[in-house]
Amino acid sequence: MDIATLERTDRADVVDLWRAAGLIHPWHDPEREYDDALTGSTSTVLGVRVDVALIATVMVGFDGHRAWIYRLAVAGPRRGEGIGRELVVAAEEWAREAGARKVQLMVRRSNVAVQGFYERLGYEDADVVTLGRWLGEAR
Ligand SMILES: CC(C)(COP(=O)(O)OP(=O)(O)OC[C@H]1O[C@@H](n2cnc3c(N)ncnc32)[C@H](O)[C@@H]1OP(=O)(O)O)[C@@H](O)C(=O)NCCC(=O)NCCS
């Protein structure tokens, strides 16, 4: 399986996959998220294409202290084949090469199903509360 760094021309397929995987909520701007992640050297989006179809993605970035994984998605019919695991490993490798010593991710509390997946890959509940605030215009 070839895991590649995605490009701007992949954007429409990426956003379709994220939507189909239930990752996009009304307050998200996935096209902008995607473009932002491809801008600069501190983040990237990795993906897998089989023939012409995009079947999996993961976004990873290094903020200078920790690396963060986002937008892990595998197309429904291709789940359970080890593709999600391979993408997380690839994101970890990217993070290691970027200089990170620890990688973290956030899972919505409502996404109970995915927690078992991450535990299987060695991720532990960090027992922290994540706080956030939008910058700029009110939403
Ligand atoms: C989460 C997701 C990426 C997993 O991808 P996948 O390709 O189906 O997972 P894999 O086949 O690589 O599974 C890896 C391991 O996790 C296990 N696993 C997968 N899903 C699991 C689950 N819900 N609970 C417990 N274990 C799980 C597999 O059995 C496998 O174990 P093994 O390697 O010991 O045999 C996929 O289900 C998905 O796209 N979900 C929707 C989007 C989403 O919620 N993304 C995460 C946002 S934080």
Image (tube, helix red, strand yellow):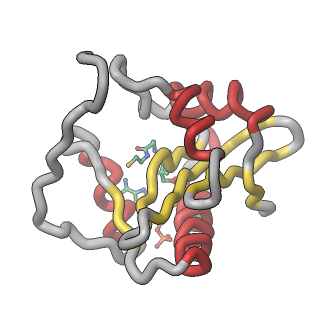
Q: Nearer the viewer, residue 89 or 104?
A: 104
Give residue 41's position: percent from left, percent from top: 63, 59
> Relative to 108, is 88 above or below?
below
Give residue 103's position: percent from left, percent from top: 40, 71
Residue at the limit of the structure toward the right, as seen here: 51
Residue 111 horizontal side relative to residue 99, left or right: left
Q: To which quarter of the image does residue 81 belong?
A: bottom right
Residue at the limit of the structure toward the front, as seen here: 136
Residue 133 horizontal side relative to residue 120, left or right: left
Quarter of the image where the N terminus is located = bottom right
Q: Nearer the viewer, residue 69 or 3?
A: 69
Q: Residue at x 29, y 18 (%)?
A: 137
Q: Number of numbered discs present?
A: 0
Q: Nearer the viewer, residue 83 or 131?
A: 131
Give residue 27's position: percent from left, percent from top: 34, 21
> Relative to 17, is 99 above or below?
below
Q: Residue at x 20, y 41 (%)?
A: 132
Give residue 32's position: percent from left, percent from top: 55, 28
Q: Residue at x 56, y 39 (%)?
A: 36
Quarter of the image where the C terminus is located = top left
Q: To which quarter of the image does residue 22 belong?
A: top left
Q: Residue at x 17, y 51 (%)?
A: 130
